[in-house]
Amino acid sequence: MSHVTGIGGVFFRAHDPKAVVAWYKEHLDIEIGGMAFWSQEAGPTVFAPFKADTDYFGSSDQQWMINLRVKDLDGLLTKLKSKGIDVEMRDEWQSAEIGRFARIHDPAGTPIELWEPAEGCA
């Protein structure tokens, strides 16, 4: 039976694509851009629209946000902060059932939600 098996890519505009590619590699260890394929670990993926007037993404002109699953959120946040990257965490984003969340932005201003799933989530 024909069906979708997962997300095949995430594509977005940037004023300086080369700088954005370098930023993702340096800070998140993700090879992006061109034909750089990223083999992910299996795990939960949420694919969900938000109301048009949500402020969850931050700026009202931001139409999308990427959520990345991470292991050792605290370790990654320490690394990002040491490189001068602003990290935002809010109590209302944390959930014993779903996991822990933090927010950063790439050089293009794209919000990136970092998610450490709760054990047994999904």
Image: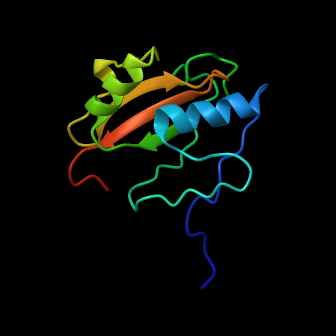
Q: Residue furthest bottom?
A: 1
Decide if residue 105 is in sight here. Answer: yes
Residue 94 pos. (x, y %): 28, 29
**Of 53 and 99, which appears nearest the observer?**
99
Q: Quadrant of residue 19?
A: top right
Q: Quadrant of the N terminus?
A: bottom right
Residue at coordinates 44% horizontally, 19% vertically from top-left? 83
**Residue 104 drawn at (x, y percent):** 48, 23
* Colour logic: rainbow
The count of marks equals 0
Q: Is residue 65 visible?
A: no
Q: Quadrant of residue 64?
A: top right
Task: Give the residue at x 56% y 69%.
Answer: 5
Residue placed most toward the observer, 121 or 102: 102
Who is closer to the viewer here, 61 or 101? 101
Horizontally, residue 92 falls left or right of residue 19, namely: left
Compared to residue 82, the image places residue 48 above or below, namely below
Please determine whether, in this image, residue 115 is positioned above or below residue 41.
above
From the viewer's perspective, tell me whether residue 15 is left or right of residue 59.
right
Report the quarter where the C terminus lies. Answer: bottom left
Task: Give how far across and how far down residue 6 sits, in percent.
Answer: 56, 63
Name the residue nearer the viewer: 56 or 102.
102
Please say if 94 is above or below 71.
above
Quadrant of the rendered image containing residue 96? top left
| Percent x, y of residue 12 | 72, 38
